[in-house]
């Protein structure tokens, strides 16, 4: 059973002429222990979706169930209790400016009714966990963005939640700090066995730590699946756009006037295939000359990922055989002929 | 400018009367005004205890109270003052109209301060399962504390100036002394003395207020 199950979720803001349909019937399932990413352009409805999970936003139709319980049917008190099993972090951190880092982390513990001594030790533990024990007495105004988000994470984890919701948690941070916060989230996720939902408009965040991804456009999920799969075989134009933000497309190259002499091939590989010497192989086996126009090796979470743009030159029948040979090695590999 | 012993005694008495009226009224004003201000904020559309009718009705009453000029207000509430204090004359009696006029001001000032607390912080507290009461007492009020201290300072200074009209109903005080002797009897020396005291007191209040605001500002 999925830990989070969203069915037919709809949310409309405003009414009459000015009404905005932020969610138009979203179905999603998030399994226990996975890092689930939701990516989409600004205004796609990502924040609204994640805010419906802990009911900061009340959906107009559809259901959100967490661990088998329908969140929309809970009473005020039950909802407050349920929310304690879900931590949330925000783009703008949303720390209490009047409290120190330690004070911010103790807030949810106080709200849950923990006693003073328990609060003190737990706060220390949490600040250690996020690597901020030396900043316990600092006020948010004295912390950098990355440190503030660490406090945010410690605070979100205070009541031992099963779920961590992240709404653009790294969007206000520079690339390096983003990487360190993502590493922290992924480390904590593994250690505590959390289920994480990450909202972002950066594909990089998805490829960095997510297991599965949903792509949203205009209030709907247009594509969904394991990250490596969505990344190697993007179907929807919006998804292609996002993949291209990480992986340069061939269109720029062709527009700049490059005229391929042979067959233009895009080869995408994941897993072990990345390490296979395919350009050398085709040259040796078929006597063709693969000209490498682009090469990109990266990883999607822990899986290696490679992308090659080849201009396969040589006698047409050999080129044909070579590309058929490449295409046959599919499974971990995707070959597209572009001309 | 030299003052006679008798004039000095009058100044002393008036100062104590002002001190009495302003301090008691300030206490009531804060005790009543801050909760009313909180109410005005939390029942707003989109806030934690959204309630359109309460918001409209309370807003209407506050506005109505604030539109009446203070001297007229004193007369207006005479029956209420009699009911509470037993008499409508004297320093204690003045505290009733003074409080009623100032606590709605305090409520509006409180409202303005609390609205400046970023909505995201309130949502973060909600996401942690905090109750509305906890959000009010542990999020809204502490976050707005510097602004609230500034509001209390404004309220005190306003009360000092309002209390000058206490003379209308025999409340005494510095303002009354200045009006009676300086304005009606042309004893300008005593008028200047009271004005000087008032200026110094207001300066002092503002200075202490500013210091406190600074002490609690963390943004
Ligand atoms: N409280 C609100 N009142 C009215 N409209 C809203 C509200 N919240 C969101 N919307 C609208 O709903 C749509 C989806 O908003 P949402 O914030 O979910 O988008 P998003 O995908 O998170 O965008 P971004 O990447 O910019 O954060 C937008 O058109 C937005 O204007
Ligand atoms: Mg958003």
Image (cartoon, rainbow, N blue to C red):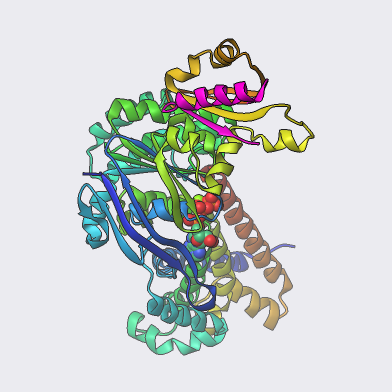
Q: Quadrant of residue A212?
A: top left
Compared with residue A97, is residue B103 higher up or lower down, i.e. above or below? below
Query: Which percent across, then down, holds residue A223?
Result: 44, 47
Image coords of residue A103 (percent x, y): 39, 38
Q: B95 or B219: which is nearer to us?
A: B219
Do we see residue B169 in this rendering? Answer: no
Q: Is residue B207 visible?
A: yes
Q: Position of residue B150 (x, y in %)?
A: 55, 56
Q: Which image quadrant is residue A163 in?
A: top left
Q: Looking at the picture, tell me which residue is in the foreground, B7 or B98.
A: B98
Which of the two residues, B115 or A249, is positioned nearer the viewer here?
A: A249
How many labels sit on residues?
Answer: 0
Q: Is residue A262 magenta?
A: no
**What quarter of the picture does the C terminus of chain A occupy?**
top right
Q: Give the magenta range.
A: A310-339
- Extreme-front residue of the structure: A317
Q: Is residue A331 magenta?
A: yes
Q: Residue at x 46, y 65 (%)?
A: B26
Examine the rendered structure and indicate whether residue A208 appears above or below residue B204: above
Q: Hey, which residue is sitting farthest right in the picture?
A: A257
Q: Is residue A320 left or right of residue A33?
A: right
**A331 lies above or below A155:** above
Provide residue A194's location: percent of width, then percent of height.
30, 34
Vertical order, B36 against A337 (above or below): below
B61 vs A60, left or right, is: right
Which residue lies at the image location 56% right of the left edge and 35% below the top edge? A173
The quadrant of the picture occupied by the N terminus of chain A is top left
């Amino acid at each position: 059973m999925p830990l989070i199950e969203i069915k037919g979720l709809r949310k409309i803001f405003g009414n009459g002429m000015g009404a905005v349909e932020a969610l138009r019937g979203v179905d999603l399932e998030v399994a226990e222990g996975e890092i689930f990413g939701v990516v989409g352009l600004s205004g796609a409805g990502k924040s609204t979706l994640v805010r419906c999970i802990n009911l900061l936003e009340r959906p107009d139709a559809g259901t959100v169930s967490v661990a088998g319980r329908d969140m929309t049917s809970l009473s005020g008190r039950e909802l407050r209790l349920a929310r304690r099993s879900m931590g949330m972090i925000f783009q703008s951190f949303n720390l209490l400016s009047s409290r120190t880092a330690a004070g911010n982390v103790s807030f949810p513990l106080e709200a849950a009714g923990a006693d003073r001594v328990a609060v003190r030790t737990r706060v220390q533990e949490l600040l250690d966990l996020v690597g901020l024990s030396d900043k316990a007495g600092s006020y948010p105004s004295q912390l950098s963005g990355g440190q503030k988000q660490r406090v945010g994470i410690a605070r979100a984890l205070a009541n031992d939640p099963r779920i961590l919701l992240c709404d653009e948690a790294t969007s206000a941070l520079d690339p390096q700090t983003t990487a360190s916060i993502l590493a922290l989230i992924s480390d904590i996720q593994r250690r505590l066995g959390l289920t994480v939902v990450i909202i972002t408009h950066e594909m990089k965040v998805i490829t960095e730590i997510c297991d599965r991804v949903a792509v949203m456009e205009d209030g709907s999920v247009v594509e969904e699946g394991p990250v490596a799969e969505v990344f190697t075989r993007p179907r929807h134009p919006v998804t292609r756009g996002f993949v291209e933000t990480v992986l340069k497309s061939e269109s720029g190259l062709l527009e700049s006037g490059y005229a391929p002499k042979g067959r233009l091939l895009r080869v995408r590989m994941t897993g072990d295939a990345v390490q296979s010497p395919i350009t050398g192989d085709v040259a040796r086996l078929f006597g063709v000359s693969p000209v490498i126009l682009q090469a990109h090796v990266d990883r999607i979470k822990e899986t290696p990922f490679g992308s090659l743009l080849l201009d396969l030159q040589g006698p047409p029948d050999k080129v044909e055989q070579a590309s058929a040979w490449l295409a046959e090695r599919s499974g971990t590999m995707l070959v597209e002929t572009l001309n | 400018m030299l003052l006679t012993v008798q004039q000095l005694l009058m100044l002393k008495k008036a100062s104590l009367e002002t001190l009495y009226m302003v301090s008691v009224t300030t206490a009531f004003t804060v005790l009543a005004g801050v909760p009313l201000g909180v109410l005005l904020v939390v029942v707003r559309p989109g806030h934690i205890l959204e309630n359109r009718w309460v918001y409209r009705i309370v807003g209407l009453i506050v506005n109505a109270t604030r539109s009446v000029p203070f001297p007229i207000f004193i007369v207006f509430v005479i029956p209420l003052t009699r009911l509470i204090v037993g008499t409508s004359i004297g320093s204690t009696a003045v505290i009733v109209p003074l409080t009623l006029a100032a606590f709605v001001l305090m409520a509006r000032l409180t409202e303005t301060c609390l609205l400046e607390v970023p909505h995201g912080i309130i949502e973060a507290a909600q996401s942690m399962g905090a109750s509305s009461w906890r959000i009010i007492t542990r999020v809204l009020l502490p976050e707005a504390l510097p602004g609230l201290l500034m509001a209390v300072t404004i309220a005190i200074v306003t009360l000092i100036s309002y209390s000058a009209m206490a003379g209308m109903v025999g409340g005494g005080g510095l303002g009354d002394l200045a009006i009676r002797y300086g304005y009606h009897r042309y004893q300008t020396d005593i008028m200047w003395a009271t004005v000087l005291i008032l200026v110094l007191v207001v300066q002092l209040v503002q200075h202490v207020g500013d210091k406190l605001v600074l002490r609690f500002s963390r943004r």
